[in-house]
Image (cartoon, rainbow, N blue to C red):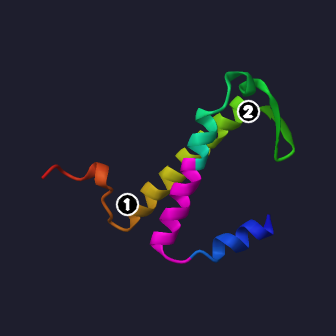
Amino acid sequence: MPEIFSAEAAVKGKAKTVAIMEQAFDAARELIRNMPDSDLEKPVDFFGRTITTRGLLFSMGNHLHEHLGQAIAYARVNQIVPPWSQKAK
């Protein structure tokens, strides 16, 4: 995993970060949309633990939810009002 961390550290700037995140979300969305239902119960190794593909997808959703919470906390600490919380004009 060191190569992943060094690749992440090389990304500079908001535009590049957003582009990479959009690419990653698009790839995940495409993978999930094209996954046959029969693959959901297949076992996968997840950091040394065997779980089903369905379980991995749930874990992925939970992980994203944790990051959303971190982003909201960061915004609040810095007095940033997220777009969904702004009053309608």
**Residue drawn where x is 12% and y is 53% of the image:** 89
Quarter assignment of residue 51 = top right
Q: Is residue 3 above or below residue 56?
A: below
Residue that lies at the very extreme toward the right in this rendered image? 48
Residue 21 in the magenta stretch? The answer is yes
Residue that carries the numbered disc 1 in the rendered image? 76
Query: As shown in the figure, which amino acid type bears the numbered disc 2?
Result: Thr
Residue 62 visible somewhere in the drawing: no
Q: Residues within 10 Å of mark 1 (few under 14, many from 20)?
A: few
List x then y, in percent, for residue 3: 78, 69
Q: Which residues are magenta?
A: 12-26
Residue that carries the numbered disc 2 in the rendered image? 53
Total marks drawn?
2
> Which secondary structure lies at badge 1?
helix
Query: As shown in the figure, which amino acid type bears the numbered disc 1?
Result: Arg
Mark in front: 2 vs 1: 2
